[in-house]
Amino acid sequence: MRLLDHFDVEGPNGIHPCLVLEMLGPSVSDLVEGRFADGRLPGSLAKGVARQALMGLDALHRREIAHGDFHIRNLAFAIYPMANIPEDEFINLLGKPDVRYVHCNDGGRLGHGIPEYIVRPASLHSRSWPLSDTIKLVDFGESFPRKDAPKTLHTPLVVRAPEVIFKDRLDYRVDLWSLGCMLFELFVGQPPFDSFLITPKILVEQMQEMGGEALPDRWAPLWESMRGENATEAGGPGLQEWLEEMYFDGERKEDMTRDDIVELGRIIRKLLRFEPGARASVEEILNDPWFEN
């Protein structure tokens, strides 16, 4: 996503840096929700989105930048350029700003630093914009340079790398775990791990069930503390079994073969590894023959 301009606004609450970014269409998640009743993209479109997402992430990693928040909600479709559309026509397309004034419930005066009014963000989701077939990687609020990794990240729990959960040293390879989760969700229509009432303990148990490998020894003390007395034995399906069960569920459109899903599982297994050093690089995944067919 391109940065077009930037400026500062001074107000009663300080100086606010403002970024002017190119206008984009809906995220992949929003497009699925708005246009595909069965909750998943067609296989050919999903593969095209995946390949572009891989290209974007590979470009970041080559420049020694980690995204830190990689999932389908941060992949957006580009729209055709609108720079030459007159402003009044553009406002009609986008909708007029929805302005609401702020007031105190007790009828008193607004305190210092409280805005007189707020403006609802414009939404593209209710309108049929002409989308291009280009995917943009957005939202760099959690990104970091390879040589200056943060202590933790706030990636959504369901796609969060295990080293974040176990407070281990972080690096750019957190993106590789999230990439594996993203590929599963992109083709299947839901994340590989439960998102409803998920907790770190439940998530780690599901990671172990699906991955079929033991946690690194250095995580054992914290894991014992997390498990407590309510430890449960792993008994869920493995990754490939779960992937096939979710894709061929009989309720949603199936336009990929079982061989395709086997190959997809092979690729995802290279990414969903507990040890960051054991995960395949983005370049390796991008060059996999499956994405060329």
Image (cartoon, rainbow, N blue to C red):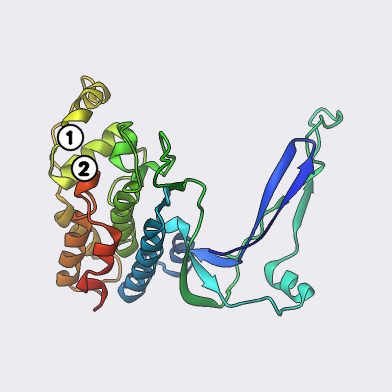
Q: Is residue 83 left or right of residue 108?
A: left
Residue drawn at (34%, 67%) of the image? 50
Q: Earlier in the sequence, mark 1 or mark 2?
A: 1
Along the viewing direction, whichever of 272 and 237 lies nearer the viewer: 272
Picture disc at residue 275:
2
Residue occupying image coordinates x 44% and y 47%: 145
Q: Which residue is drawn at the image coordinates 72% and 78% (left, top)?
A: 85
Element at badge 1?
A: loop
Tag of residue 216: 1
Quarter of the picture containing the C terminus is: bottom left
> Residue 83: x percent and y percent?
68, 76
Relative to 174, is 247 above or below?
below
Q: Amino acid at mark 2?
A: Glu
- Horizontal arrangement in the rendering, residue 122 relative to residue 155 (left or right): right
Across and down, in percent, residue 260 comes to: 19, 71
Q: Identify the image quadrant of residue 86.
A: bottom right
Examine the rendered structure and indicate whether residue 213 appears above or below residue 285: above
Q: Are marks 1 and 2 in contact (CB under 8 Å)?
A: yes
